[in-house]
Structure formats: C-alpha cells, structure tokens
Image (tube, helix red, strand yellow):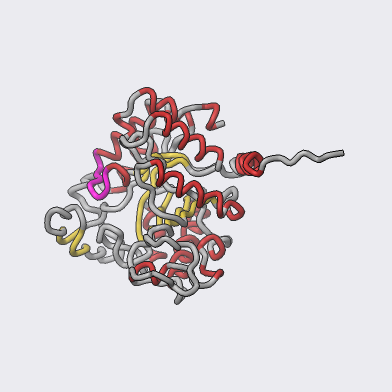
C-alpha cells in the first residue's frame, strides 16, 4: 500500500490551530502604539474602549486595551521634530513608584482601569527592561518588583515589558533576571488578587538581519544589538523564557511595519519557532496592521487568516474608532476566530 504524504503546511496549520484550545486562548485586544505612538492619552484610551465595547469587537472576543509607551511623567521633551519623546525622564514618587503624566491622564490610573473594567473589558500597561523606555521615559530596570506590584494595585490586567536600551545585556544575565523578576511578581500578585495578569515580553527590537542567533556577532555594529543578540543557544528568548515565571506572550522578531513584506517576514519567523509556541506561552508576530492604511482589503484578509491559523495573539494596532465596515468585518469574522 502506498502511503500518501500530507503536505507539511497542512499538518502545521492543523497543529497550530489546536494550540488555541486549552486553558488559555491567545489574547485579543488593541494597543495604542502603532497609531498614536507617544501621544497616547486618557481620551484616546477611553474612546477606544467604548468602541471596542459597542462595535462588535468585544462580542467577538477582543478584551484588552493596552496603553503603550509615553504615559509616565517627563521633566523635559526632546526638541522638534522629536518632541513627543522624552529627553529627561521624570523621577519616581517618594514611595519609589512610577509617576503618571497627569496632563495626559488627568484622572490617574485607578480611575481609568475602573472605567475600562466597567465596560466589561481589561486594560494593559507598558514598561521597559531598561532604565528608560523606547521613547525615553522612565523604565523598570532594578525596580521590577515594585513596578509589578504597583501595576497590579492599579488594576492592570496585562503588562507589556519592552526591551529597548543597551543597559541590560542578555550576556550578563541582566535581561533574564529582570524579566524573571517581573514575571514572577506579576504571577504572585495575580494569585493574591485572584485574577491572572498577563505578562507580555517584547524581545524583538534589535534591528539586525541575524536577530535570532549570531555566535560571532558578524556584521553587528549597533550597540543595542550587541547586548541582546544571542551568541549562545541558551540565550535564545524562546528557550530561557520557557519557565514557570515565563511570559504568557513573547515576541522574538522585528517590530511590524504597515506593509505586506513586513507581515510575511514576521509570519515566517513565527513558523520557524513554532515548536516553542504553546497555550499560555504564545509567540507573537507583533500587532497586525490592517486598518492603518497600507494593506489592501485582500491583504488584510490574508494577514488575519495567517494570524488566526498560527494561533497568534490578535492585538490590533489601527485606530479602531475610525474603521470602515469591510475592515471591522475582517476583525470580527467568527469563522476565523472560532
């Protein structure tokens, strides 16, 4: 009897579809970063939350509203044209906690998280492994435990831990220690509060063509890449984060751009490390960019199909408040989501 060979792509799609079945499904929601960058404020968060609750997104399974970089107090901004970035990060308060920018978030965070929760949604916050964030604002280096406890006390349901900066190296154990401290504390605080706090590690920022593994640092000139690019197998992020404290969501490749080729690059990397993607330890190809303007409707459909087949988190990056029905239909396609 001749045994028919099933195409590898079919097997992969079937296996990855099963990963979404279990005690935890890939997180679904929206992030401020792709559209608003460092200009995020309370009005944007509240109006986006209302949109999610009232337009069918919530009913389709989207539940997280994520405040990305730019929310902490800043003593001085960069000069134009980079005047949304911080030049002089603000100090912590007398208790060592991060300080909210009260111009951007006049109600403070507890009021804001309560508001989002009142809509039946969850809310996330951003910080960085380094002393400063990607935008130059105050980060969490050496303050992981106090920051994790503060995020939990403010009512946040998800924490995104970015890895911008060159002051915390993967080769010295700094990166591993900082993320373990953050992840362990968030899990402990969640257990005390009786709710899970999702830990999202964004380890995919160094811009280098051999991002994943480069034993001899060939052709690497960027200082930030040198401290984050794996030179030993055990420094690969999907290996050292596979632990009880490890992130629920992790990223290992380039930041997504609003283009077809960027999407394909990140999806291909998703396939390359599929072995390390599992329920509760989801590998993300970064935020889908459908609705931001550069992908056609056909490309949006393909992007959404690939993300769902791969069992990837769906954290939308467009302005969900201003999307045409054709795009919203893609986001809420029940056949794909279920």
| Figure quadrant of the N terminus | top right
Magenta range is: 36-43
Residue 132 picture quarter:
bottom left
**Quarter of image, res 139:** bottom left
The percent coordinates of residue 295 (x first, y second) are 36, 35
Comparing 86 with 122, the one in front is 86
Q: Residue at x 30, y 48 (%)?
A: 109
The C terminus lies in quadrant: top right
Farthest right residue?
1
Q: Is residue 260 above or below residue 220?
A: above
**Is any part of residue 22 visible from this angle?**
no
Q: Where in the figure is residue 94, as x and y percent of width and height?
A: 25, 66
In this rendering, position of residue 80 left or right of residue 59: left
Does the magenta run of residues contain 55?
no
Toward the bottom, the furthest residue is: 172
- Tell me which residue sits at (35%, 42%) in the image: 258
Q: Position of residue 28 (x, y in %)?
A: 46, 40
Residue at 30% in and 31% down: 321
By secondary structure, the bulk of the magenta-drawn segment is best described as: helix
Q: Nearer the viewer, residue 45 or 20?
A: 20
Q: Residue furthest front?
A: 2
Residue extending farthest left: 80
Q: Residue 87 in the image: x percent, y percent?
A: 18, 63
Q: Horizontally, is 232 left or right of 31 in the view?
A: right
Regarding residue 167, the answer to whether it shows in the image is: yes
Decide which of 294, 153 is in the foreground and name it. Answer: 294
Q: How many marks?
A: 0
- Quadrant of residue 260 within the rendered picture: top left
């Amino acid at each position: 009897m001749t045994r028919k060979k099933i195409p590898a792509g079919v097997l992969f799609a079937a296996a990855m579809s099963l990963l979404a079945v279990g005690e935890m499904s890939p997180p679904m929601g929206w992030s401020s970063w792709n559209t608003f960058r460092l200009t995020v404020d309370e009005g944007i968060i509240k109006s986006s939350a209302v949109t999610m609750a009232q337009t069918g997104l919530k009913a389709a399974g989207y539940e997280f509203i994520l405040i990305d970089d730019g929310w902490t107090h800043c003593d001085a901004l960069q000069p134009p044209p980079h005047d949304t970035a911080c030049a002089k990060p603000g100090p912590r308060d007398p208790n060592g906690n991060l300080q909210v920018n009260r111009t951007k978030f006049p109600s403070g965070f507890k009021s804001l998280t309560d508001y989002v929760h009142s809509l039946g949604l969850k809310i996330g916050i951003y910080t960085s492994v380094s002393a400063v964030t990607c935008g130059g604002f105050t980060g969490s280096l050496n303050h992981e435990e106090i920051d994790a406890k503060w995020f939990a006390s403010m009512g946040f349901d998800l924490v995104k831990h970015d890895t911008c900066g060159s002051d915390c190296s993967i080769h010295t154990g700094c990166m591993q220690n900082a993320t373990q401290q953050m992840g362990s504390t968030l899990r402990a605080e969640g257990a005390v509060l009786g709710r899970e706090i999702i830990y999202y590690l964004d380890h995919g920022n160094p811009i280098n063509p051999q991002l994943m593994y480069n034993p001899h640092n060939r052709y690497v000139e960027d200082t930030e890449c040198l401290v984050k690019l794996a030179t030993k197998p055990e420094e690969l992020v999907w290996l050292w984060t596979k632990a009880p404290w490890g992130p629920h969501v992790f990223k290992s490749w380039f930041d997504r751009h609003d283009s077809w080729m960027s999407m394909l690059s990140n999806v291909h990397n998703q396939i390359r490390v599929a072995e390390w993607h599992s329920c509760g330890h989801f590998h993300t190809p970064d935020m889908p960019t459908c609705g931001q303007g550069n992908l056609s409707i056909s490309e949006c459909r393909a992007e959404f199909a690939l993300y769902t087949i791969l069992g990837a988190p769906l954290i939308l990056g467009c302005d969900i408040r201003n999307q045409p029905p054709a795009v919203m239909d893609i986001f809420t396609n029940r056949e794909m989501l279920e």
